[in-house]
């Protein structure tokens, strides 16, 4: 009986001790693992590495942040790791595809996570994708892609790089042909430069970082952008929503490109203690106004349009809230199969 009472007392003491541990106590001397669900290069990688260099100083206890890439299946591999393998104590941050919540809703193959269970920490920027074409291509506008095949360099099947053109093909009757297998945006852009593909679908920020000269020297043309409204830098390029007059098609496309509002967002594992989630969110918010962080992004031509973790938490849970009939229609046009 004495041993049982002693065990109970020890368990109660350990529980009380854990509860009394402040975020500063927990993070002091620790290392936070920041996982990027994409290859090196590109805007997601650049944003995450900049965040990793500056956010630690704003977290109580000032932990070090170590960044590592975990590409695979359009960031599904990283999301699954964070959901079920990584320590659920606030020592892990990650960035994945902005379409994770929508893909979960429609039951996309390979989803082994529940984005509503992630603890969303904050967004650095919204993410506008666009299809650009090498200036040497005879394609002059998106209308041409309805009458002739247009070859695009592709990366992961689960990424917006392939999803957006695929939906345009199946829903709106366009003729984009994706050549898959390129390891990230940098390789895909190199394929365009070598003439292996006519164009590529990627984030506007990624093109600005990798090839500002292509933009300044008008070496590329922009066919369509994926957002709820036209980006100021792409004022002459139509959104995908503008390409149809059908109300149901518009609703499906709006649900699809709502992912642009998730953008470059960071999340942690499920079941993190609330005070640590709050500490991470406030540290993220502080980083978004940190002069050194902002100067670094400016040097690499990256923009900032932050969104707080609390807003992201609600937004991610509501993303893709389509009626069942339209959800099934979106599911039917979402993948290449």
Image (cartoon, rainbow, N blue to C red):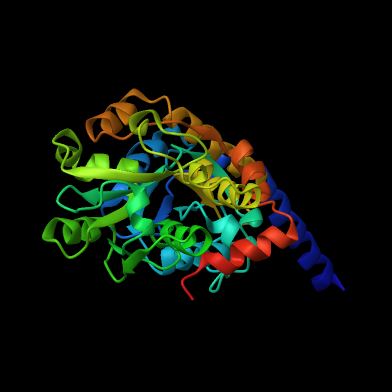
Locate residue 148 relative to residue 90 in the image: left or right.
left
Q: At 52% from the left edge and 39% from the top edge, which residue is drawn?
A: 228
Q: Is residue 24 visible?
A: no
Figure label count: 0
Locate residue 296 relative to residue 105 in the image: left or right.
left
Q: Is residue 311 visible?
A: yes
| Image quadrant assignment for residue 78 | bottom left
- Given the current orientation, which residue lies at the most extreme right position? 1
Q: At 59% from the left edge and 41% from the top edge, which residue is drawn?
A: 312
Q: At 74% from the left edge and 55% from the top edge, which residue is drawn?
A: 323
Q: Quadrant of the N terminus?
A: bottom right
Locate residue 143 relative to residue 333 in the image: left or right.
left
Q: Between residue 11 and residue 256, name the one nearer to us.
A: 256
x, y percent for residue 92:
48, 54
Give the answer, above or below, for where 239 lies relative to 150. above
Give the answer, above or below, for where 222 lies relative to 114. above
x, y percent for residue 81:
50, 67
x, y percent for residue 120:
57, 46
x, y percent for residue 179:
29, 69
Q: At 59% from the left edge and 57% from the top edge, which residue is drawn?
A: 102
- Given the current orientation, which residue lies at the most extreme bottom position? 337
């Amino acid at each position: 009986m004495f041993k049982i009472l002693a065990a109970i007392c020890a368990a109660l003491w350990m529980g009380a001790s854990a509860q009394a541990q402040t975020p500063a106590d927990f993070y002091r001397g620790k290392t936070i693992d920041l996982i990027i669900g994409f290859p090196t290069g590109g805007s997601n990688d650049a944003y995450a590495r900049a965040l990793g260099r500056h956010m630690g100083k704003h977290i109580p206890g000032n932990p070090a942040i170590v960044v590592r890439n975990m590409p695979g299946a359009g960031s599904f591999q990283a999301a699954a790791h964070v959901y079920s393998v990584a320590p659920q104590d606030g020592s892990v941050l990650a960035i994945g595809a902005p379409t994770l919540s929508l893909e979960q809703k429609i039951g996309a193959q390979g989803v082994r996570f529940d984005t509503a269970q992630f603890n969303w920490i904050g967004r650095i920027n919204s993410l506008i994708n666009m299809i650009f074409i090498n200036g040497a291509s005879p394609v002059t506008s998106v209308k041409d892609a309805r009458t002739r095949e247009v070859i695009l360099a592709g990366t992961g099947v689960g990424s917006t790089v392939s999803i957006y053109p695929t939906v345009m093909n199946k829903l709106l009757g366009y003729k984009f042909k994706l050549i898959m297998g390129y390891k990230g945006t940098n390789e895909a852009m190199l394929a365009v430069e070598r003439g292996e593909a006519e164009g590529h679908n990627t984030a506007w920020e990624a093109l600005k970082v990798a090839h500002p000269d292509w933009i300044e020297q008008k070496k590329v043309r922009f066919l369509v952008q994926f957002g709820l409204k036209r980006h100021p830098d792409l004022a002459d390029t139509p959104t995908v929503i503008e390409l149809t007059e059908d109300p149901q098609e518009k609703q499906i496309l709006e649900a699809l490109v709502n992912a642009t509002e998730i953008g470059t967002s960071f999340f942690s594992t499920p079941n993190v203690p609330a005070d640590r989630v709050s500490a991470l969110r406030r540290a993220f918010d502080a980083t978004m106004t940190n002069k050194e962080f902002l100067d670094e992004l400016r040097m690499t031509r990256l923009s900032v349009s932050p969104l707080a973790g609390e807003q992201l938490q609600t937004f991610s849970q509501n993303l893709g809230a389509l009626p069942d009939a339209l959800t099934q229609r979106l599911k039917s046009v979402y993948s290449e199969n």
